[in-house]
Image (cartoon, rainbow, N blue to C red):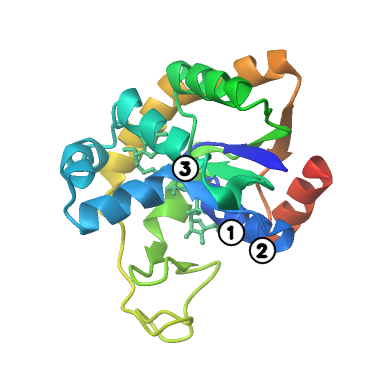
Amino acid sequence: MRLILLGPPGAGKGTQAKMLKEKFQIPQISTGDILRHAVKDNTDLGVRAKSFMDAGQLVPDDVVVGLIKERIKQADCETGFILDGFPRTMIQAEKLSETLTEMDLTIDTVVDLEVNADEVISRLAGRSTCPECGAMFHEESRPPKVLGVCDGCGGTLAQRQDDNSETILKRLEVYQESTAPLKEFYMRQGNLKTVIARGSVEEIFSRVCEMVR
Ligand code: AP5
C-alpha cells in the first residue's frame, strides 16, 4: 500500500501516519522529521534546511526530491510506504510520479485531511514533541501524564521551533500557495480522497482507514 497524506500544517498528518504505520506495518516517511533530524545533527542537509524551516518556508525542491528518491528505493519500502509532508509543490509531485513510473509503481490513495485554520492554529500552539523518540502530545487533546515529560521514553518534551504564531501563519500561507493546488493534480489522477479531520484522533483514523482499504 502506497499512500500520501496531504493537508495543512497541524492537520494531523504525522499523528495519522504513525497509526497507519502500526496498522499496515509500512514505513512512515516524513520529510519534516528527516529534515529536523538533520538540523539536530548539524549535517550539511540540516545546515541548508534550517533557515527555510525556521522561517516557515519550504526547503528547495531539489533537496527533498533527492531525499525521497533515495528513501523509497530502500528495502523496507517494498511492501509500501506512507508519505507524510511530501510532495508539497507541483514540481515535487511531478518528480515523484516520474520516479514511481521508473520503478513501475503507483500511489494507491492520496488522503487529504481537511481542517480549518482556527483548529490548526490551536493544535500547533498546544503541541509538544519528544526530541528523543518523536512522540507527540497536545496540552488539551493529548496531554502527557507528567507535564513536560514524554510518556514513552521519559525524554524532555519541547515545542517545535516553527510552532510560534508568526511562523504558523507563514506556513499556512505557503500551504495555500504551493501545496493546496496538489489536490487538483491528484483529483485528476483519480486517487484523491478527502477526510474531514475534525473530531478525535481515533474518529479521524477510522475515516482514513475507510478510505485506504
Ligand atoms: P512538517 O514537519 O511536515 O510540518 P507541517 O506540514 O507543517 O505539519 P506538522 O508536522 O506541523 O503537522 P501535522 O499535520 O503532521 O500534524 P500533527 O499530527 O503533528 O514540515 C516542517 C517544515 O519542514 C516545513 O515548514 C518545511 O520548511 C520543511 N519541509 C518538510 N517537508 C517538506 C517538503 N516536502 N518540501 C519542502 N520543505 C519541506 O498534529 C499537530 C498537533 O495536533 C499535535 O499536537 C497533535 O497531538 C494534535 N492533533 C492531531 N490530531 C488531532 C485531533 N484530531 N484533535 C486534536 N488535536 C489533534
Residue denoted by label 3: 71
Task: Report x, y in % for residue 89.
Answer: 44, 22
Query: Do we see residue 113 in this rendering?
Result: no
Please name the amino acid that badge 3 sits on: Arg
Cα separation between marks 3 and 1: 17 Å
Residue denoted by label 1: 18
The residue under the point 52% across, 16% down is 94
In contact (CB < 8 Å): disc 3 and disc 1: no
Please name the amino acid that badge 1 sits on: Lys
Say whether disc 2 or disc 3 marks the residue closer to the N-terminus: 2
Total labels drawn: 3
Query: Do we see residue 207 in this rendering?
Result: yes
Task: Report x, y in % for residue 87.
Answer: 49, 30
Secondary structure of the residue carrying numbered label 2: helix
Task: Report x, y in % for residue 145.
Answer: 48, 85
Mark 1 close to ligand 1, CB under 8 Å: yes
The residue under the point 66% across, 39% down is 3
Q: Nearer the viewer, residue 104 or 1?
A: 104
Say whether disc 3 or disc 1 marks the residue closer to the N-terminus: 1
Q: Quadrant of the C terminus?
A: top right
Local packing at callout 2 (Cα closer than 10 Å; few below 14, some 14-19, many 20+) is: few
Q: Nearer the viewer, residue 117 or 68?
A: 68
The residue under the point 31% across, 62% down is 159
Residue denoted by label 2: 22
Left or right of residue 151: residue 25 = right
In contact (CB < 8 Å): disc 1 and disc 2: yes
